[in-house]
Structures are given as C-alpha cells and as structure tokens.
Image (cartoon, rainbow, N blue to C red):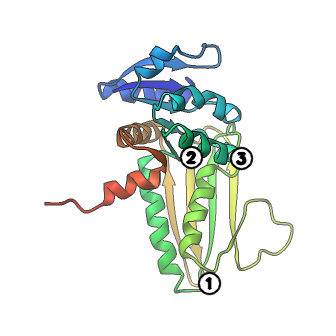
Amino acid sequence: MRIALIGYGKMGKEIEGAALARGWTIPVRVDIDTPTPSADAIRSIDAAIHFASAAEILSSITPWVRSRIPVIVGTTGWQKDFDAVCALIREHDSALLYSSNFSLGVNIFDSLVREAGKMFDCFPEYDAFIHEIHHKDKVDSPSGTALALAASLMQNLKRKREILSTQPDEKIRPDQLHVSSSRAGSVVGTHSVVFDSTADAIELTHRAKNRTGFALGAIAAAEWIQNKRGVFTMHDVMRDLFAPRKE
C-alpha cells in the first residue's frame, strides 16, 4: 500500500516505521512546512493517515476526500467539526475512519469494559469511576480515550447517565460517572476503570508501554477501510475482527 502521512510528529514517525516494516511505502508526508501535494500525488495514494492539528481538520482532509482517498483520523479534539466532516464525506462519496485511540489493546480493553458494564449493572452496590494518566505535554484533559471508555461503559451500566469530567465542587450524584485525570512525566497513557463497593474493588487497567500499538491499529484501519464508503470507527474494525470465522 501507498500511504500519505498528514502530520509528521511523534505519531507520524511511529506509523512510518511500522508501515515500512510491513512493506508499505510512504511517498507523501505532509507537515506544517510542506505544501499541499499535487492532485496526481494524492490520486496515487491508497490511504491518508491524519495525526495533525485538530483546528485545521477540514482543510487538511478536503483534498484527499475530494479524490476519494480514504482518510484515517487519529487526531482528537475535532468533534465540533464532526457534522461538517461527515457532510464532506457524503458529498464526495468517500470514506473516513476515526478513533480517539487506535491501539488494538485499548480497543480490546473497550470491549472488556462494555462487558463489565453489563455485569455490574446487576449489582448496584458497586460504584464506578475512571481515571487516566498521561505525559505532561498532553493538551486535552480528560483524554479522548477516557471519555470514549466512559461512553462505552454507560451504554451498559444504566444507572450512570452523565459524565462528570471536571473537578467536583459538591457531592457526586449517583447517576454521574466521574472521569478524572493526572498529567505528569512521560507516561504514554494509562486508563483505569474501577468498580468499588464497601466489600471490595475490581480494577481494569490498560497501560501503554510505547506508541507502537497506536501505529499498528492505524495501519489495521487503513487496510480495513479499502473499497468502503462512509464514516466508520474502530468499533467497526474490531467487530469484523471478532466476527466468527466461516469454516
């Protein structure tokens, strides 16, 4: 496959290394100081992987979408433009796959959290909360992954109806799911979902060791989205991976 990297920071370089090791080529790299590739260069690409500025999401993906090149978006913090991005994809009958976290481990973890929510929904004596830790340079807080885990949990833990992602200044209501954050050092990413009662506590934790898992997930997404049209998430990829194999 021929891949374009939109954003050539730490994640872009991590994806580059994983893609080259898989036998892919990276003929186009777009960064803050590089001009928009030519139409011919864009049309030669199989997928564009976006880990760049959220503020410029529309302008940075438009040339690719117009050429119907599938786009993988790992950038977070662009949800205010979500409707406009979806409209752009529909207008050009193109494809886009986004996720707050492309790590295969995190997406397996998300599936476990969903199942845990079903179980603990039967036991109201257990309260639930989420805590995440990231390096001191991370911009958003809580992380997009933590908020996505909260949404997944709330789909099955019905007594939680609202995410509280700020520091509480009063008693937390029983229907609130508290999502808290710490920023320190060089932590790649740690997410914990805890179910606590007066008798005991059960803690599920995913701890990223490096960025390799994110890169491999983005590569899997780029392979999966080929010849598809529409807007997708990593849930679609994982559903196909978990689907029973036909003999």
Q: Is residue 33 above or below residue 195?
A: above
242 with respect to 102 (left or right): left
> Does residue 36 appear in the picture of this structure?
yes
Residue where numbered disc 2 is placed: 189
Q: Residue at x 47, y 79 (%)?
A: 119
SS assignment at label 3:
helix
Classify mark 2: residues with Cα within 10 Å, few (<14), some (14-19) or many (20+): some
Query: Which mark lies nearer to you, 2 or 3?
Result: 3
SS assignment at label 1:
loop
Residue where numbered disc 1 is placed: 198
Q: Is residue 80 above or below residue 37?
A: below
Classify mark 3: residues with Cα within 10 Å, few (<14), some (14-19) or many (20+): few
Residue type beneath disc 3: Lys
Counting residues from the start of the chain, the first of labels 2 and 3 encountered is 3
Foreground: 69 or 9? 69
Q: Residue at x 51, y 27 (%)?
A: 12
Foreground: 208 or 118? 118
Residue where numbered disc 3 is placed: 80
